[in-house]
Each structure stands twice: as C-alpha cells, then as structure tokens.
Image (cartoon, helix red, strand yellow):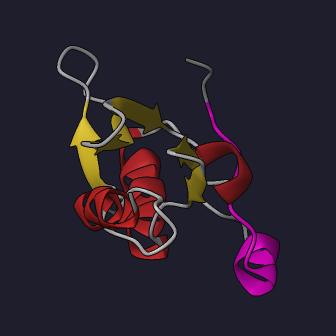
Amino acid sequence: MSSETEHYKSLLGKQDGAPVVADAKWHLAVGLYSGDPYLRTSCSTCHTTWETTSNDPAIGAFKHCRKVEEPPKELVEKLVQYQIAKGIRRAPSIFQRITGQTPDLAKAF
C-alpha cells in the first residue's frame, strides 16, 4: 500500500502530494479593436486567464491554483508608460514624480 501512495506522490511532484504549479507568464498585450494596452496571464494547470489594466498589485494580482501572483514591476511600469502615451492615463505631475505616485486614469473604460 505504501508503494502505491509513494508512486502517486511521485507523479504529482511534491513530497506532500500537492501538485506542482508552474508560474504564470505575464505578457503586455494590446487590444485588437481599441488598441488599449493591458497585462495578460494564464495558467496551464487550472486553465485560468487574467487580464488587467490596473497598476495596483492588489487589483492586478492573478489568483489561481490556491496561490496569488502579482504582475512583474517592469511590465506594470511599461503598461503605465503605454497608457500615458495613448492618453488613457494622465501624465504625472511634479508632485507625483517626487513622491513616486502613479497618475490617475484619464478616461473610463
């Protein structure tokens, strides 16, 4: 009986029997019709996809397979730059540049 359980555990990948979940890969994408930039990710294990236009890690976090992944900071910075260039997000004021705050959205989706 123990050899069967060990065999199943080896198939699942971890010693405690929990499945191995691959990290989701984040991509910076552009909408087909609107041309608006957004962040997109998907999980091959649970087949869940997530798209976000937010730069807030609490809102843009991808929840899947009993874990939470935040988007990479480099992609969030690029997303904000593209949104400013497209006119979706306002350019940062001098105060926002000094304090490191992100400017608000200029238009609602």
> Which residue is outermost to the left?
32
In reply to whether residue 97 is colored magenta, the answer given is: yes
Percent across and percent down for residue 75 are 38, 65
Residue shown at the point (40%, 65%) measured from the top left? 2
In reply to whether residue 11 is colored magenta, the answer given is: no
In the picture, measured across the screen, residue 67 lies left or right of residue 49, that is: right
Which part of the image, by quadrant, shows the C terminus? top right
Which part of the image, by quadrant, shows the N terminus? bottom left
In the picture, measured across the screen, residue 100 lies left or right of residue 52, that is: right
In the picture, measured across the screen, residue 22 lies left or right of residue 76, that is: left
Percent across and percent down for residue 73 are 49, 73
Residue shown at the point (30%, 42%) measured from the top left? 45
Q: For this rendering, which residue is in front, 89 or 23?
A: 23
Residue shown at the point (46%, 68%) measured from the top left? 77
Q: Which residues are magenta?
A: 94-106
In the picture, measured across the screen, residue 109 lies left or right of residue 32, that is: right
**Quarter location, residue 15:** bottom left
